[in-house]
Amino acid sequence: MEIAVLVWITDPMAKISFGGILFVAILYCLIQSFLEIDKLILVFIVGALALLTEFSKLNDGIKSHYFHENQVLGKLLGPEFEINQIWSFLIGCSLIYFLEVSNDNSRPTKKKFF
């Protein structure tokens, strides 16, 4: 899905935004499929991992590793720090929160005042 965004979306701003939301969703699904963690805690963990990935681009953290040599990972992670990527991570985490965590279908109970 992420590669489809890279290939078919030509607007760089839309590519950054949609790619960041997909990155958070894919990371959430990947971790949730292997570990049994509370959903709210997992949303915070995924958000922290996404932000850590983005902030590691500030001090050449990713460039010093294998990622810059690999063409696919270099394209997926992006070459440089983008502040708009952080906003898309936050939107992705909030979408996961509203779709997964706050999904309480129980009816509200009536409060008795007397």
Image (cartoon, helix red, strand yellow):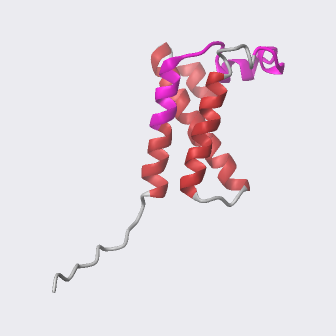
Number of disc labels: 0
Question: Which residue is drawn at the image coordinates 57% and 39% (left, top)?
Answer: 47
Q: Which residues are magenta?
A: 63-91
Q: With 110 as the anchor, is 93 left or right in this view? A: right
Q: Position of residue 24 (x, y in %)?
A: 57, 38
Q: Position of residue 55 (x, y in %)?
A: 63, 23
Question: Which residue is drawn at the image coordinates 54% and 21% (left, top)?
Answer: 8
**Quadrant assignment for the N terminus:** top right
Asked whether residue 1 is in view, the answer is no
Q: Is residue 67 above or below residue 21?
A: above
Q: Is residue 43 above or below residue 106?
A: above
Q: Main secondary structure of the magenta part?
A: helix
Asked whether residue 41 is in view, the answer is yes
**Image quadrant in which you'd find residue 45:** top right
Q: Is residue 46 above or below residue 106?
A: above
Residue 34 included in the magenta stretch of the image: no
Question: Which residue is drawn at the image coordinates 59% and 30% (left, top)?
Answer: 51
**Image quadrant in which you'd find residue 73:** top right
The residue furthest left is 114
Q: Position of residue 102 (x, y in %)?
A: 42, 58
**Quadrant assignment for the C terminus:** bottom left
Q: Position of residue 104 (x, y in %)?
A: 40, 65
Residue 90 included in the magenta stretch of the image: yes
The residue furthest front is 114
Along the line of sight, which residue is nearer the eye, 109 or 105?
109
